[in-house]
Amino acid sequence: MPPQLPDDVVEEILARFPPDEPALLVRAALACKAWHRIVSGAGFRRRLHGRAPPLLGFFHHNGSHPPSFNPTSPPFRPPYSPRAGWLILNARHGRFLVARKMTTTSTSPFATPSTEVVELIVWDPTTDEQHGVPMPPFKYSTWSAALICAAAAAAAGGCDHFDCPKGPFLVVFVFTDNIYKGTMSACVYSSEQGSWRVPTCTHCHCQGHGCRHSLRVRGPIVLVKNNAIYFGCDKNTSVLEYDLGRQKLSMIGPPPVCYCQDVVLMTADGGGLGFAIVENPKLCLWSREAALREAFTAEEARAGA
């Protein structure tokens, strides 16, 4: 019988399994007790977690039906599914921020049913653990929200996100009570305190129809290394920046080429704010200069986008 491989050699082999096929590690863990000990060990899991996370799939909204999961790795499917009436807002480090909607009907035969968001939910699809978050006690007409790891916010990005699903979280809620007033506000919910903090606000200096577009907040949402979170606005006329450390909300303009275009916010190389726009047949990437609020750098243009 050949000698047994040392644990460090086995770990090196297991660490080279394709990251987009997690089922292989599950099978390896079931092969023998020694391999199970290696795979389930904190050191091995932390090593895997340090790599770029693979895309195992994504949730897709399809009309009035609950969000469906579309796997990019055929064997993988989360053990729990979203419920009816759920709207997935965003996800971060294994947890999802969900808006639970409820439809109300009137006794009047002429009234149409109305749908409103009654609460936010922080949901872990691997354990089905749910944490209810009440809607803010403020008046709002349009809004967006993002989920943040509380440890990362407190340490300016110092969390390794290894145990984020078990830890405290923050929900950043940006809103306006009237798109014609030109004011945006932001408030933060802390799971440790169980309450919403006092809102902070910023004023939009634009005028007329374009300002109304600026104040209709939408996704995507990007968290960058300077502990700031960014929300895209309708028509991409502006971007909302919320500084988690200073608890300050401000509004910045996108690169001129991105104005009123179909733009995706992203994390640029180096961890700053980036923009992606398709100019057929190229994918153009822009990054924001850290020292200059309105200065942007064209990173590259890739053909065949």
Image (tube, grey):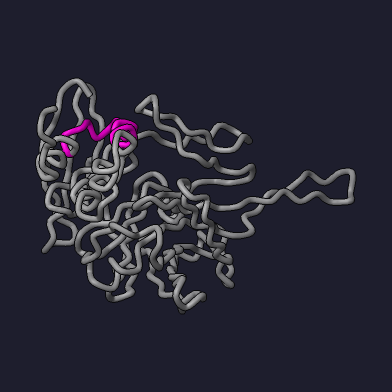
Quadrant of res 139: bottom right
Q: Which residues are magenta?
A: 15-28
Which of the pair 115/55 is nearer the observer? 55
Quadrant where the N terminus is found in the figure:
top left
Which of the pair 17/274 is nearer the observer? 17
Is residue 261 magenta-colored? no
Q: Position of residue 61 (x, y in %)?
A: 52, 36
Residue 115 left/right relative to 81: right
Q: Position of residue 278 (x, y in %)?
A: 25, 30
Which of the pair 272/140 is nearer the observer? 272
124 over 31 or under it: above or below = below
Quadrant of res 177: bottom right
Is residue 19 magenta-colored? yes
The residue shown at (13%, 36%) is 4
Asked whether residue 209 appears in the rendered view, the answer is no
Residue 214 left/right relative to 79: left
Quadrant where the C terminus is found in the figure:
top left
The residue shown at (38%, 68%) is 203
How many tags in the picture? 0
The residue shown at (27%, 63%) is 228
Q: Residue furthest front?
A: 1
Q: Position of residue 222 (x, y in %)?
A: 30, 52
160 over 265 or under it: above or below = below
Q: Position of residue 302 (x, y in %)?
A: 14, 28
Asked whether residue 112 appears in the rendered view, the answer is yes
Which of the pair 147/141 is nearer the observer? 147
